[in-house]
Image (cartoon, helix red, strand yellow):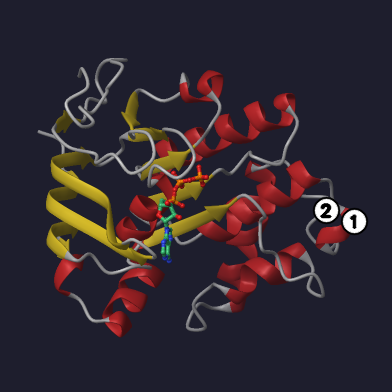
Amino acid sequence: MMEEMIRVEGVRKAFSQQQGRLPIIEIDQWSARKGDAIALLGPSGSGKSTFLHLLGGVLPVDGGLLEIAGQQVSGMKESERDAFRAQTVGYVFQDFYLIPSLTVKENVELVMPRSMSKPLRARLIGEWFERVGLQDRMNQLPAKLSRGQQQRAAIVRAMIHCPPLVLADEPTGSLDWETASSIMKLLLDVSRENGSTLVTVTHDLHLAELFPTKLQFASLNQLLKGRAESSSDKRAMQETAAGGVSS
Ligand SMILES: Nc1ncnc2c1ncn2[C@@H]1O[C@H](COP(=O)(O)OP(=O)(O)OP(=O)(O)O)[C@@H](O)[C@H]1O
């Protein structure tokens, strides 16, 4: 049986807005297993990024159970969530967030444990940059690289510590179609090789087709409800019943 990576039971999140507390996320039950690759789909404002931030411990849940890699994130204080995130989660963003004054290699070195010996660090970095096709570019500043190359470097930074969970928020949103497609395939390949669970927000339905599991968020201010079982063994379109819409 495959190991469970994400367990969501009765998770709720609301934000204070002019009209009062507005519920954004309300998920009865959902789970994902080690190695699953999941695309989060849905219209703007439906709560995809909020859900990703809950999974990564960036935002606290208002209620319910959220368990990631056997850790009960829903019961953690902010400092505990920060420590959880550093160990368990790799984040990939639309805008890369590489530090412009450092080479891409130095950007990656920043997140590596200080306890790691210099030779091991150099070997790992060399292997990873080769894996993403940037072995000749790693001593350059981000601005000297194309946007696709910058995202490849950001993927190395997010994944070099082999996090069990990788969260990507529109990782290809600012790239042309061909580059976007190659970056999404790279993310999927590297996650699979690492045995990581990958959860990606995307607006692109063609790119979402690369993912065995899809989780559909409802339109603005409707609640994500109902059940969704992960299935990594078949390419099943997975829709979560949103406000009673078909599943
Ligand atoms: N910190 C916050 N305070 C108040 N409201 C918020 C906050 N963050 C998000 N929201 C609201 O929650 C809703 C969901 O936002 P979220 O960014 O999760 O949607 P999304 O599906 O990721 O949208 P997009 O595809 O446009 O990025 C929106 O109505 C947004 O205005």
Position in image of residue 166 (x %, y %): 42, 50
Q: Residue at x 31, y 59 (%)?
A: 54
Tell which tag, 2 or 1, sits nearer the viewer. Answer: 1
Q: Is mark 2 within 8 Å of ligand 1?
A: no
Above or below, comparing residue 14 to residue 218 in the picture: below
Q: Which mark is residue 137?
A: 2
Q: Where the C terminus falls, by quadrant? A: top left
Name the kind of residue labelled 2 in the image: Arg
Above or below, comparing residue 206 to residue 148 in the picture: above
Name the kind of residue labelled 1 in the image: Lys
- Where is residue 192, by image quadrant? top left
Along the polypeptide, which appears first: circle 2 or circle 1?
2
- Residue under circle 1? 144
- Where is residue 84, by image quadrant? bottom left
Q: Nearer the viewer, residue 11 or 36?
A: 11
Q: Residue at x 39, y 42 (%)?
A: 46
Position in image of residue 44 (x %, y %): 49, 40
Left or right, 174 with reference to 89:
right
Q: Secondary structure at mark 1?
A: helix
Circle 2 crowding by C-alpha within 10 Å: few under 14, some 14–19, many from 20:
some
| Residue 150 seen anywhere in this rendered image of the structure | yes
Q: Residue at x 79, y 68 (%)?
A: 103
Q: CA distance from mark 2 to mark 1?
A: 9 Å
Q: Quadrant of ligand 1?
A: bottom left
Q: Are marks 2 and 1 in contact (CB under 8 Å)?
A: yes
Numbered label tally: 2
Left or right, 158 with reference to 173:
left
Position in image of residue 190 (x %, y %): 50, 40
Q: Secondary structure at mark 2?
A: loop
Above or below, comparing residue 211 to residue 74 in the picture: above
- Where is residue 109, by image quadrant? bottom right
Position in image of residue 144 (x %, y %): 90, 56
